Amino acid sequence: MKSINGHMSLLATTFVIHAAVLALASSFAFNFLPTITRTTTITTTAALFPSPFIKNIIYRAHKKYSPVQSRLQTKVLEEDTMTAFESVQVPKIDALTLSQMVEYATSFSAANGLQVEVASAEKEQKSYVTAPISLLPQCYPLSQFHNAISLAAPFNELVDRISRDGLFLKETLKDVRGVDEYTGKLLELYEEIYMGERKGMDWGKHARSADRLGIQRSDYMLHRSSNEQGEYSLKQVELNTIASSFAGLAATVAKLHSFLTKRLDLELANFLHENEVAVMGGITDLETSPFDDAEEDELSKGVPQSPSMMRIPLAIAVAYSRYSERFIPRLSTANTVPVILFVVQPNETNTVDQRLLELALWNNHKVPVVRMSLAEVYKKMTLDEETGRLTFETGRNNSKKHEVAVVYFRAGYAPTDYPSGYNTKDGSGVEWLARERLERSAAAKCPSLGYHLAGTKKVQQELARPGAVERFFPKAGSVAANIRTAFAGLYSLGADANEQDLRAVKEVLFTEGGQGRYVLKPQREGGGYNYYGKDLAEKLGENCTITRSDGDNENSDVKLSPSLSEFILMERLFPPQQRAILLRNGKVEGTGMTISELGCFGTIVASGGDTGEVILNEYAGFLLRTKFSGVDEGGVASGFATLSSPFIC
């Protein structure tokens, strides 16, 4: 006991001495020294003490009693230093701060579910690690963040209107279906279920009357050509209409980044300021801390909070409630429980992101979720041809019946999700048979086949044609015009390719540096399928017949092979480069210059029929994905990028 008391006495004495030195140094510095000398004194005083706790008190006292500019000068003194933590050197961040951030991030991820599942052969033993994240947020202009938010509802409605226009979808995808079996199968099912082709109108009657639920994500990059000056503009990379993921994890990353940038605001000021200059240009105002007067809303300077875990569950719950009101009272018995069906991949590792949504559905709306793969749907799910009800049974002796009110696809977006093949006539293509069964039901689908097809790259390219968007907003020219502002250059490689499209192809093939100004994209989701640079030029060259005109490339005749119909050519975007620290598996992967892609979620619920009534249509949150600038692809799940957040500036 005496020993403990002795240690406590020694600690108390040490603290008093530390506090006394702090008081003397601070009082002298604040009252008698000029700003720069004052700053040096505070920094030197802090350096005398090994305790991070005491150092923090000193820096906080400096922040509280000195002007903002002199606070920042404390860190400016260190701006050219390079410090190491676990063999990673980060400009403008010292080793202690980096160590703190990593510890905070890994602890926060464990406490708040910012994790991904580790792939393992042992299905009963699950383990999790911190999701791939950027340790700090990336600066983003307020005006363009607001622009992305404002486009969410118009793009939602555009998708809904496209989904109901079968002639447009058939005409747009007619060349693709001949060379891309996957897209061709989707279109075939759409024709049979929603257009009554081959199997008659009764075949899809329940699907046509069912509500449509969209959880979409429009992805954007800031863009400015190398020969341009001024502000960056917002350009759409793609529009995701199926399995738009990471809403849950992204909302949690934003909370982490908000905490870090406020908790360590002084230590991170110069790092964030350097990135802000890279995005905004020139010298920005250092006189005001981003948190001195910031309000806690989504458009304040600093890290906004994403509403995705409120608004996405709300949209699903609206579709669920509408189904229950329409069908459950008259079609169900007392032991039938309506549920949401999550269609998932058998070996999914992004389970936490999905579970966050499932938990929010239960906590906020008391809506139960059931998870099945497409193969399990085929084995367990029954479709009542008369009523359109999808049901399955559980419990002892199958005593409990469940009725599916909403089908939410987190799988089915790639050919690999249909391993049994495309032959449904002999019953072997069980995943496609399951997809057909789900689609033909009266349950709301997220997405319906029409929504899914509206998100293909070919449709994206066709919408860039003059008059295409206006077709869907004939009485709202301003809506179409606003949507068009987000389009990058998009070019067809199919039979409908025009002179403008061929000029882009020739630029890739014949112009120095041309291959670096475009991206070749197939009709695929998930990352890892695109062609860039030399690979792009080779792919085009191998599938073009070129007749040269006396060495004049401009007048050379270029004929596109039909095999290119499954691709589109897109203008390559050049966003600002910012420094980032990337964390993977809970460890610092590295630091360097990075680029980012902003995704804006949107939700829509619309009734069935040819026109449909929009019940709900709103912006539903965001994510930011960050990758090293030398990496071409951008998927998080595919291992190319990390989750981040915007730091509004």
Image (cartoon, rainbow, N blue to C red):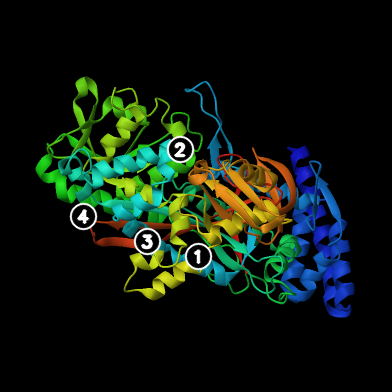
Q: Which residue is mark 4?
A: 609
The residue positioned 58% from the left and 48% from the top of the image is 520
Callout 4 touching callout 3 (CB < 8 Å): no
Q: Which mark is residue 158?
A: 3
Q: CA distance from mark 1 to mark 4?
A: 30 Å
Image quarter of the C terminus? bottom right
* Lateral position of residue 438 relative to residue 541, left or right: left
Q: CA distance from mark 4 to mark 3?
A: 16 Å
Residue 201 shows up from this direction: yes
Q: Which residue is mark 1?
A: 148
Q: Which residue is outermost to the left? A: 330
How crowded pointer 1 is (Cα within 10 Å; few <14, some 14-19, many 20+) is rated as many
Q: Which residue is mark 2?
A: 414
The residue positioned 48% from the left and 40% from the top of the image is 352
On the image, the x and y values in percent for residue 149 come to 47, 65
Q: First in sequence: mark 3 or mark 2?
A: 3
Q: First in sequence: mark 1 or mark 4?
A: 1
Q: CA distance from mark 1 to mark 3?
A: 15 Å
Q: Nearer the viewer, residue 66 or 523?
A: 523
How crowded pointer 4 is (Cα within 10 Å; few <14, some 14-19, many 20+) is rated as some
How crowded pointer 2 is (Cα within 10 Å; few <14, some 14-19, many 20+) is rated as few
Callout 1 touching callout 2 (CB < 8 Å): no
Vertical side of 596 occupied by 8: above or below? above
Q: CA distance from mark 2 to mark 4?
A: 28 Å
Q: First in sequence: mark 2 or mark 4?
A: 2
Question: In the picture, residue 513 is in which quadrant?
Answer: bottom right
Q: Nearer the viewer, residue 615 or 31?
A: 615
Query: Amino acid type of disc 3?
Result: Leu
Q: First in sequence: mark 4 or mark 3?
A: 3
Report the mark closest to the observer, 1 or 2. 2
